[in-house]
Amino acid sequence: MYKLTLLFFVFCLSCFNIFGQNSFPASGSVGIGTLNPNPNFALDVNGALTASEILVGQLNVNELLVNGLQIESSPWNLNGNNVFYTGGNVGIGTNSPNFELDVAGTLNATNILINGTPLENSSSPWTLSGNNISYSAGNIGVGTSSPGYLLDVNGAFNASNIFINGTEIGPSPWSISGNDLSYSNGNVGIGTNSPNFELDVAGTLNATNILINGTPLENSSSPWTLSGNNISYSAGNIGVGTSSPEYLLDVNGSFNASNIFIDGTEIGPSPWSISGNDLFYSNGNIGIGTVNTQGYMLAVGGSMVAESIKVELQGNWPDFVFKKEFSLVSLKEVEAYIQKNHHLPNVPSAKEVKTKGINLGEMDATLLRKIEELTLYSIKQQKEIDSLKQMLGKKLKAENSIIESLEKRLVKLEKSSY
């Protein structure tokens, strides 16, 4: 009993002694296996260290085991204050990282370095402003090392929304289903900013096949056939801009072609051109209802109706008739000319009109001249009439005065006779 009590006392004293030898200062480093711990570390272990769990702040060990496994065979490496991973991608907040460092969640850092240059460095093209990050030295490539645009994404792109010039464009009309790309908001233009059709290609189109109403052009049952650069249709008429074509090729709308062939013969660039609602022809004369224009720019073989026709003469309009220096032929001379030639001066005869026709512009000018001459004749005659009326009025007044005088004398004579 005495021996047992003595052993218990010695054991307690030993424990007290051991506890007394362990002290934990508030500053400095702790050394295990070394009397001179590295001041850069809180714990400096000179020897093997095994633990089921380690929380690392600053740690320096020659050999480290976690759950009995040596860290030396691990992809994680410690070098000074740096920790390295050489076995693939590192995921924070995710078990399946897709990048060397893949953070699924908010990332908070005092700074970020790209190619060793801090984002907040004045010489860096990268700048941080609040939650925004900007790049000012060229294009940014995602999935590509040679971006051709300010933002060039080579691969799938997912965004809650897109802004163009600060304007929200809303959900994209583009959608992807398998290998198919669909557009649901208007026409698609390739090589043009103003497509007029559901698919409008301004340029060469290269495709392994084309389907019309779900039928491939190369299908044996299709009326469409491909031969080199040529496409043929063998089941009726083709309508462009119309669903009821009446000709092999019926175009309802503007038509632009570099050249046209008729029966295999090239007719060259078209002399016809359209500007707004106007149609122009720049290569010769036009015949309507006739193949012989007889040298006229527009020859119509038949009746023509129009609400309005405008004739612009290159010569003078006959306003010269009203000028002072114009010599008006007397009516007597006009009468003599008519009796001799049986038509007015300066007016074509019936024989001339029958053989040569008339020029509408010139004829209108001639008729206007005659109207103006008639106006001058009328003015002259009116002046003569006014002059005669004035003379006649004076004469009548004088005669009335004489008559009144005679009447008075007659009255006197009658009174004196009584």
Image (spheres, rainbow, N blue to C red):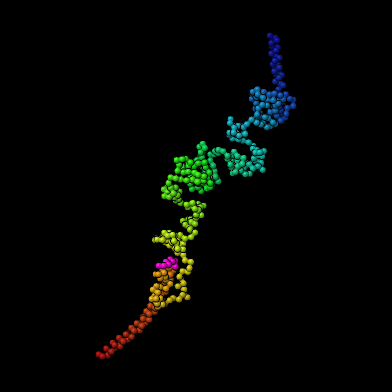
* Side (left or right) of 71 relative to 262: right
Residue 215 image point, x, y percent: 46, 40
Q: Is residue 317 above or below residue 208?
A: below
Q: Is residue 127 above or below residue 4?
A: below
At x 45% / y 76%, what residue is drawn? 327
Viewer-proximal residue among 108 and 125: 125
Which residue sits at x=39%, y=69%?
350
Residue 359 covered by magenta stretch: yes
**Residue 69: x and y, percent?**
65, 24
Residue 117, located in which quarter of the rendered image?
top right
Residue extending farthest to the right is 36
Above or below for 391 versus 139 = below
Magenta-highlighted residues: 354-362
Q: Is residue 208 magenta?
A: no
Q: Residue furthest left?
A: 418
Q: For residue 339, what is the image quadrant?
A: bottom left
